[in-house]
Image (tube, rainbow, N blue to C red):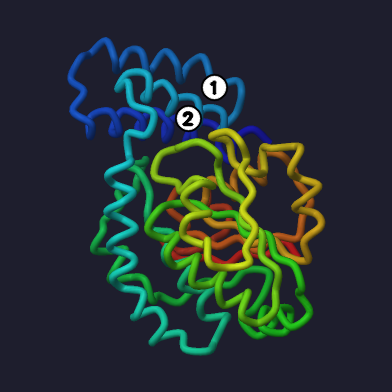
Amino acid sequence: MLYIEVPECILCALESRMQEIKKFGVNDVNNYMRISMKISELIPRGRTPLFIESFEEIMRILNNNDPHAKEKVELENVASSILHRVIENAGDDITRYFEIAAAANSVDVPMRDYQFDIDDFVNKLLEDAVWLGISKNKLGELLGSVRSVGYVVDNSGEFQIDALLIRRLVDVGINVTVYARGLPYEVDVTADYVSKVLNNTNVKVVSTGTRYPVFYNRSLLGNLKEHDLVISKGVGNFEAYLENNLNLKVLFLFRAKCGPMIRMLRVPKNSPVIYSTL
């Protein structure tokens, strides 16, 4: 599967990249033409290459290898300041940390029909999730037999919530390996950054080595299969999984931000979702 819905995913990539270069103050019409032409070239290759390599084109236009660096620091700082709310709300209920991790996936770059709002990130952090393919009670039971988890991370800001959940998993005796992009992509955290945040834990961090998500890295799929459970954050990782027709035991945590995802899962727009392939 190359796209969830071909027309809408292509329009999403085009609108997202146009909004992105506008956000960085680009006014030269030739650069907008350049992005449009690049997207046209990438369409036959599928959704993930379309988004990844059109972002690389933006990097070349801006002559900046990490154009969202300042924004990522701000997101992490905001999230760090509200972690006490997460801890107070979840207490010792580890499954509640999963719900909050899904709700935290509001962070994103501008995209079709969705605009990230830092106030929404803060105010909607404790929303209840829609559970699909698994219940909260079933997850609690499952965790009792899990010994190894692969955790696929996504955006900055929400990663602070992920780190809380990861530490909770370690506290109950689960070995956790975190998988992260090796190079900057949008507002996603990189493996180097994850290693710095989790340096006082027994968590192993694995880099994809590229800007591509782990579900596009064939050499790492064997690693993922060795875990009792894979936890994956974000819509982009979910779509990469679907595009490659993978068969792994994965618990996806994300917000349903786009039309195709909302229609496929039959959930309200922007709702936190916990979706299981177990």
Q: CA distance from mark 1 to mark 2?
A: 7 Å
Q: Name the kind of residue labelled 2 in the image.
A: Ile
- What secondary structure is marked by label 1? helix
Tell me the residue at 29%/60% (across/down). 77
C-beta proximity under 8 Å, tags 1 and 2? yes
Residue drawn 32% across the image and 34% down it: 67
Q: Kindly tell me whether residue 259 is visible in this rendering.
A: no
The circle drawn on residue 71 is none
Residue 214 appears in view: yes
Q: Amino acid at mark 1?
A: Ile
Residue 239 horizontal side relative to residue 86, left or right: right
Q: Residues within 10 Å of mark 2 (few under 14, many from 20)?
A: many
Residue at 36% from the left image edge and 40% from the top image edge: 112
What is the number of the mark on residue 43? Answer: 1
Q: The N terminus appears in which quarter of the rendering?
A: top right
Q: Vertically, is 35 above or below 49?
A: above
Residue under pointer 2: 10
In this picture, residue 63 sits left or right of residue 257: left
Write the residue at 62% across / 59% down. Answer: 151
Q: Give 278 or 216, whichever is nearer the viewer.
A: 216
Looking at marks 1 and 2 on the same chain, the residue that comes earlier in the sequence is marked by 2
Is 166 located above or below residue 155 in the figure?
below
Give the x, y percent position of residue 257. 43, 53
